[in-house]
Image (spheres, rainbow, N blue to C red):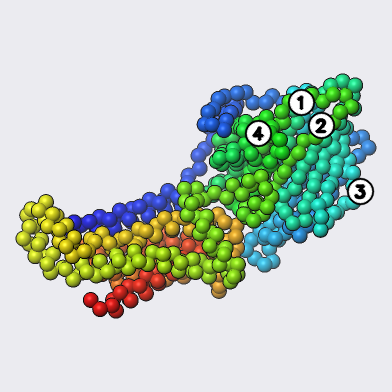
Amino acid sequence: MDNNRTILAVVLIVLLWSGYSLFFMPQTPVQPVEVANQVQEVQTKPETSVVQPATESATTDLIVNADREETFLTVSSDYYEIKLSTIGATIRSIVLKNYREENNPESAPFILLDADNFNQSTLQTSGSEGLYLPANINYKPLDERKHIFVDRENITISFAATANDLTIVKHYTFKPDSYSFDINVELINKSASVIDGKLNLSLINPWDKDKKSQMYTFVGPITFDGEELKEDKPDDLEKSPVIYKNFVWSGYTSKYFLNVINPAEPVEQVFISSGDGFIENKLTSQRFNLPASQNLSLDFTSYFGPKQSEYLESSGHRFEEVIDYGFFHPLSQPLMVVMKFFYGYIGNFGFSIILLTICIKLIFWPLTQKSYKSMKGMQKLQPEMKKMREKYGSDKQKLNQEMMSFYKENKVNPLGGCLPMLIQIPVFFALYRVLLGSIELRHAPFMMWITDLSAKDPYYVTPLVMGFTMFLQQKMTPTNMDPTQEKIMMMMPVVFTFMFLNFPSGLVIYWLTNNLLTILQQYLIRRQPD
């Protein structure tokens, strides 16, 4: 048992280093492989099959009604500014007013979407399997205003177009206090015969191959099937588009923002594919028959905004399910709730992290208190343990048996030295997920030079101070190790300091605060009478 603490320390270092390499270091990008076009069909169950992709062309020549040219209409509120085009009655750009591009007071508002042309504009509407409805037909706006401000109540903006004997009216209903808006597509059969087919609504998201997913951050199309999130890597979509038959919503996620569509009624499928510089989530309705002089109405709800739980939940449709911290979600979510609770009172996430750390330390205080007392007790037993090693040095089995009996009689734990650090590891990873992926922490300042808790300390001050406090904590910890073992244990502050140099500064503040509280606890234990 004499080497158990050494072994455990080495294992701990390897575990943390492996976790750092696996979870935090950028991965080498996989080169795309040329393969024949095929589609992977995905059901709600993990059952897949291969089908042929749709044969209809993605775009046609621009269809402009003879008496009209492309015009634009801008809708804005305190939350957003959205530019709509009459070509396809699509959205050409979205600007989020309450978020900045960079962590700079002079920075421009965050641009969620900025399409240079029709092909990259979003919410395109088209027909298939008998329904003639070109995606880029030119609609006529039914409101003559060029700029509309959504202030106190919902405002509906409508566009109308005619293709053969079919009239299409596309309604957008914008809300003053939400990043969500509704879409209604109305089809009116003006012919003397039945029109049948399927309607498609396409969510288009510009895609740059240089913007890869990194670490825990997934960037790309995402679909919620009612039970779990389905993430489809854009590189994989180049080889094989994907179809989901049963789903609640489908969209596109980046680190902090979400574009998503939820159909009011079940649709046939969502077809997710990769195009030239964009990703497309194409929702296809069930096949319908529209009799003469009848109309058909299809409803959708969309969300284009931050991945912030308050806005997502108020929009309904379970959009908040996009906030997923992975394996550590059961622990990460309450940590975020507690931090936001503290933030509601003090208005600073840095101090909220400090208060959260104090709460965590208080929860584990009895366990660490017992552990440190056990270590202190072992230190006093060193003379007796040395005699036992001399007596049974040649019989390892007998020595271990005697040592175990000795530990039990004196109520000490030989592995107690690493226990306080081991119990912090799950909290460490859970908090890392919160700090890395929560938009509340994006550009959140602390004090002085730390202006973004989700980014690293630009001057590496806090990681170096954290390393020093960890070294001091190690020196204060009661030990019964020989010089070789002590050197191994002293490697941990060096390894941690190196790892923390590029970690979010909020995480470094957590670990630094925890070290200071541990030093205080060890100081109080030392002052207690034996």
Identify the residue position indicated by label 2 in the image. Answer: 296
Q: Is residue 108 above or below residue 71?
A: below
Looking at the rendered image, the disc whose residue lies closer to the viewer, 4 or 1, is 1
Residue 234 seen anywhere in this rendered image of the structure: no
**Spatial separation of the CA atoms under disc 3 and disc 1:** 33 Å
Q: Which tag is nearer the camera, tag 3 or tag 1?
A: 1
Circles 2 and 4, Cβ within 8 Å, touching? The answer is no
Question: Which residue position is annotated with label 3?
Answer: 144
From what the image shows, is residue 298 above or below residue 313?
above
Please name the amino acid that badge 4 sits on: Val
Which picture quadrant has residue 427?
bottom left
Name the mark on residue 288. 1
Residue that numbered label 4 is attached to: 270
Q: Earlier in the sequence, mark 4 or mark 3?
A: 3
CA–CA distance in space, label 4 to label 1? 17 Å
Disc nearer the start of the sequence (3/2): 3
Amino acid type at mark 3? Glu
Q: Residue 422, located in which quarter of the rendered image?
A: bottom left
Q: Position of residue 383 (x, y in %)?
A: 12, 69
- Do callouts 4 and 1 mark residues in contact (Cβ within 8 Å)? no
In the picture, measured across the screen, residue 101 lies left or right of residue 290, that is left
Q: Quadrant of the N terminus?
A: bottom left
Asked if labels 1 and 2 touch by Cβ distance under 8 angstroms, the answer is yes
Three-letter residue code for mark 1: Phe
Counting from the top left corner in percent of width and height, residue 180 is at 72, 49
